[in-house]
Image: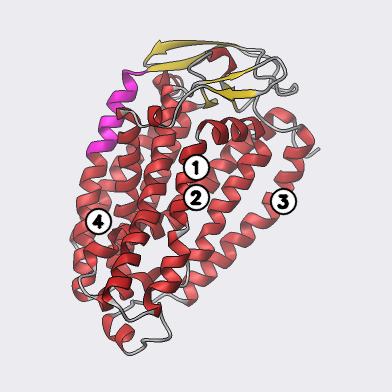
């Protein structure tokens, strides 16, 4: 074995975090672009310009989403089982919403009809806004605890409902997700388009950054007053996964314990706020490349803030805190984590390499004139 079991458990928490960050920066940006489509593009040519900024990349970017889902299934099977039973209707809603994206991108411009294209524009908006909202709502519910049980045979059962997931705190988390992705997409479109489209993109990006700062701060204050979870006693972290062998207690503000115990982790929320402010400045002075870099780091700060706040919990149980799933007791076997780690070391650098190559080779501003002069060779 390359690493001992405890080290691998920690490594896989980091790896899944990296995959979620990759998804947010790449495919999240595509979602943000689709959400902005109807607002920054006032004519059909302008909207086609917006779509073609991601036309060469959107399908490849979904590799991060697929990889993150596969890694979650293989590394944390009990989390996968609990999440897909508890969030079943939410996941189905995401799945059906995502259908609009490939269909919308490929079929929107095939028919020269205003009604046809307008309908697909709204389909692309829904296919991006709904998943972004649901992903944020799901993360919000993790802080509140998910109503599930685990019996002595380690079978997971969920006792909640879909509408219970749509509580005020979770909806704020969903709005944080939407605003941060729109802000990221605004910087991208300001960089990759020209003239009026770029100007409008920068404006919407700045509006979204301001909304993100307010909502992220509100979520932080709310979390400080939430009942959080903390481990009192834990089984052998080198032993086999057993979510029934620990004792967990709850206390108000416990989600902030990691920041007091490890002050260096305050870097992540500070980074999220600081980079949002930097992106505002860079966009205002028309430096969208630096703005895009700033929003990318902002996304890292947000995701790591959520991860550090929850650590080591992955899915707390509101029914019975003692069976909450953590990185130590919700994982696959030592051998499985080892084999998967080898695969990650080989394939993630390849994904990064070809993704980078695609962006470098296809890097240019997309203009309205180019789209109007190329009616059949572009989206």
At x 41%, y 21%, the residue is 255
Residue 84 in the figure: left or right of residue 377: right
> Circle 4 sits in a helix, a strand or a loop, which is it?
helix
- Residue 76 percent location from the top left of the image: 64, 34
Magenta includes 200?
no
CB within 8 Å, label 2 to label 4: no
Residue underneath mark 3: 343
Image quarter in which the N terminus is found: top right
At x 19%, y 62%, the residue is 285
CB within 8 Å, label 3 to label 1: no
Q: Which mark sits nearer the N-terminus, 3 or 2?
A: 2
Number of other residues with Cα within 10 Å of mark 2, as a class: few under 14, some 14 to 19, many 20 or more:
some
Residue 347 in the figure: left or right of residue 213: right
Magenta includes 224?
yes
In the figure, 256 relative to 136: above or below?
Answer: above
Number of other residues with Cα within 10 Å of mark 4, as a class: few under 14, some 14 to 19, many 20 or more:
many
Image quarter in which the C terminus is found: bottom left
Q: Which mark sits nearer the N-terminus, 4 or 3?
A: 4
In the figure, 90 relative to 319: above or below?
Answer: below
- Residue 314 percent location from the top left of the image: 54, 29
Residue underneath mark 1: 91
Residue underneath mark 4: 205
The image quadrant that residue 188 belongs to is bottom left
> Circle 2 sits in a helix, a strand or a loop, which is it?
helix
Q: Which residues are magenta?
A: 214-226
């Amino acid at each position: 074995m390359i690493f001992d079991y405890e080290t691998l458990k920690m490594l896989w928490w980091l790896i899944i975090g990296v995959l979620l960050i990759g998804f947010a920066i790449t495919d999240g940006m595509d979602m943000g672009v689709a959400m902005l489509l109807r607002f920054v593009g006032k004519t059909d040519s302008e909207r086609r310009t917006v779509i073609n900024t991601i036309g060469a990349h959107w399908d490849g970017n979904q590799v991060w989403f697929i990889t993150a889902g596969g890694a979650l299934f293989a590394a944390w099977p009990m989390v996968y089982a609990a999440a897909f039973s508890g969030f079943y209707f939410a996941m189905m809603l995401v799945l059906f919403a995502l259908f609009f994206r490939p269909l919308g991108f490929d079929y929107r411009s095939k028919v020269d009809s205003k009604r046809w294209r307008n309908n697909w524009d709204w389909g692309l908006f829904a296919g991006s806004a709904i998943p972004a909202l649901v992903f944020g709502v799901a993360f919000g519910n993790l802080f509140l605890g998910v109503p599930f049980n685990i019996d002595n045979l380690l079978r997971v059962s969920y006792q909640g409902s879909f509408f219970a997931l749509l509580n005020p705190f979770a909806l704020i988390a969903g709005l944080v997700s939407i605003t941060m992705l729109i802000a990221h997409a605004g910087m991208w479109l300001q960089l990759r388009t020209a003239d009026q489209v770029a100007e409008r993109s920068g404006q919407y990006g700045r509006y979204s950054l301001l909304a993100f700062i307010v909502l992220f701060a509100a979520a932080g204050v709310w979390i400080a007053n939430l009942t959080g979870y903390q481990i009192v006693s834990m089984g052998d972290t080198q032993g086999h996964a057993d979510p029934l062998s620990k004792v967990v207690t709850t206390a108000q503000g416990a989600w902030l314990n990691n920041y007091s115990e490890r002050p260096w982790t305050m870097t992540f929320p500070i980074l999220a706020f600081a980079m949002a402010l930097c992106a505002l400045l860079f966009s205002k002075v028309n430096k969208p490349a630096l703005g895009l870099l700033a929003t990318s780091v902002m996304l890292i700060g947000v995701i790591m803030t959520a991860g550090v706040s929850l650590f080591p919990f992955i899915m707390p149980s509101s029914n019975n805190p003692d069976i909450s799933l953590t990185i130590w007791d919700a994982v696959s076997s030592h051998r499985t984590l080892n084999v998967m780690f080898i695969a990650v070391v080989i394939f993630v650098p390849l994904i990064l390499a070809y993704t980078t190559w695609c962006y470098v080779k296809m890097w240019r501003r997309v203009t309205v004139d180019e789209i109007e002069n190329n009616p059949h060779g572009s989206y």
